[in-house]
Image (cartoon, grey):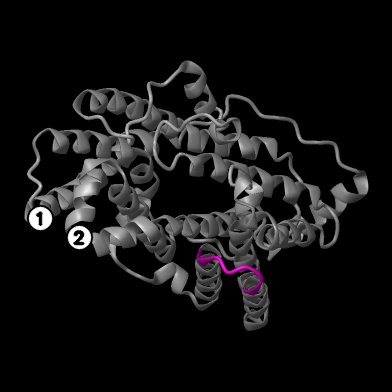
Amino acid sequence: MKTAPSRMPLIDALKAVASQLVMLHHIAIYGPLAAAGALHFPELSGWFAEYGRIAVQVFLVIGGFLAARSLSPDGRALADNPLPLIGRRYLRLVLPFLVAITFAVIASAIADQWMSDPAVPERASFGQWLAHALLLHGVLGADSLSAGVWYVAIDFQLFALFALLLWAGRRPLGVLAGVLGMALLSLFWFNRHAELDNWAIYFFGAYGLGAAAWWASTRGRLHIWLGVIATVGVAALVEDFRLRIALALVVALLLGFSRRSGLLERWPDNPLLAWLGRISYSVFLVHFPVLLLLNGLFSMGGSEGGMSVLVTLIATWVTCVWAGSLFHHWIEAPSARWRLPFRLPRPALPQRFSLRHQAARSAADRG
């Protein structure tokens, strides 16, 4: 069996571009600096405000692609207890998330003294902080303490749902029926109802497209499997055109093709994109507190001339990236080494299935 590469430059590049677009979207919609940018650069500011947010779909597709690579690279069911995997994912997401949320609370308190703006969150309560810590803030309707934090909870829900579907599909075609069936339900039904956007089922269509792209790239006749994915995606768009789903489909097809062709592991060979991709989660987490503080400073004495606003916008962008780099080095990377202090027992499986799984795993190891 071929060992998967530790880094994939194309995924790093996609994450780099998507994280920057999401950050620029927030710069374009929050605070007095956003208002000044819209005044002097209405077309550019309007584009980021309208379209920058859909870059989140890139992360959803990549999430499904990497989850399939990690949990079920050959499309087999997950035989082990999924709870430790879900627990590790929770720790991986929530440890840096809580630090970033703490920064956001502090930054909000400071910015509230400098400016009066709807972008500044209300004073946080302990219950609100706890809802964020449990990644239940969207489900419980708690006011967000930072911009974009809904995505962290959705990422965790998607991974947990994916792992549970893999574990439940312990029969022939069970995995494909469970995961791809849920993806179809999402694409054709759940994703068309905005009131469901606090739940994984709303986003599972994009996540499932990513998983399907990985599985398609492991099989023969790639063009047929990618054709099936494209047909399903186009059918969903014909039923109800959504630009976010169109982007998810394009990214999924790109990942499936690039993995089989080898581009995934060697292109683009760009150190800047690799670095921005590596720190993308940190940039996503920490840019809003920085943005609040810089908006507060701008509101207290920034010149509103066109050139001055442009320089301030660029400085804000660079500062947010720099803060994300520091956060990655000091917070995210060290926290990734934390592990659960205990192991959950494996579920008892029927002997027939257990023997079949062992034989399949031995055959895979020999391959």
Q: Residue at x 80, y 53 (%)?
A: 169
Q: Nearer the viewer, residue 102 or 277?
A: 102
Q: Nearer the viewer, residue 299 or 97?
A: 299
Position of 318 compared to 107: left or right? left
Can residue 78 be seen here? The reply is no
Q: Which residues are magenta?
A: 238-243
- Earlier in the chain: of badge 2 and badge 1, it is 2
**Percent coordinates x, y for residue 206 in the rendering:** 58, 60
Dot 1 alpha-carbon crowd within 10 angstroms: few under 14, some 14 to 19, many 20 or more: some
Using the image, determine if residue 325 lies above or below residue 10: above
Q: Residue at x 53, y 76 (%)?
A: 257
Position of 367 compared to 136: left or right? right
**Percent coordinates x, y for residue 125 in the rendering:** 45, 18
**Percent coordinates x, y for residue 157 in the rendering:** 61, 42
**Where does label 1 land, which residue?**
306
The C terminus lies in quadrant: bottom right
Disc 1 marks a residue whose amino acid type is: Gly
Q: Residue at x 52, y 29 (%)?
A: 142
- The Cα–Cα distance between marks 2 and 1, rounded to whole angstroms, is 8 Å
**Percent coordinates x, y for residue 199 in the rendering:** 63, 44
Q: Residue at x 68, y 36 (%)?
A: 83
User: SS class of the residue under badge 2?
Assistant: loop
Dot 2 alpha-carbon crowd within 10 angstroms: few under 14, some 14 to 19, many 20 or more: some
Whether the magenta-drawn stretch holds residue 34 is answered as: no
Position of 6 compared to 291: left or right? right
Can residue 354 be seen here? The reply is yes
Q: Nearer the viewer, residue 53 or 214?
A: 53
**Where does label 2 land, which residue?**
41
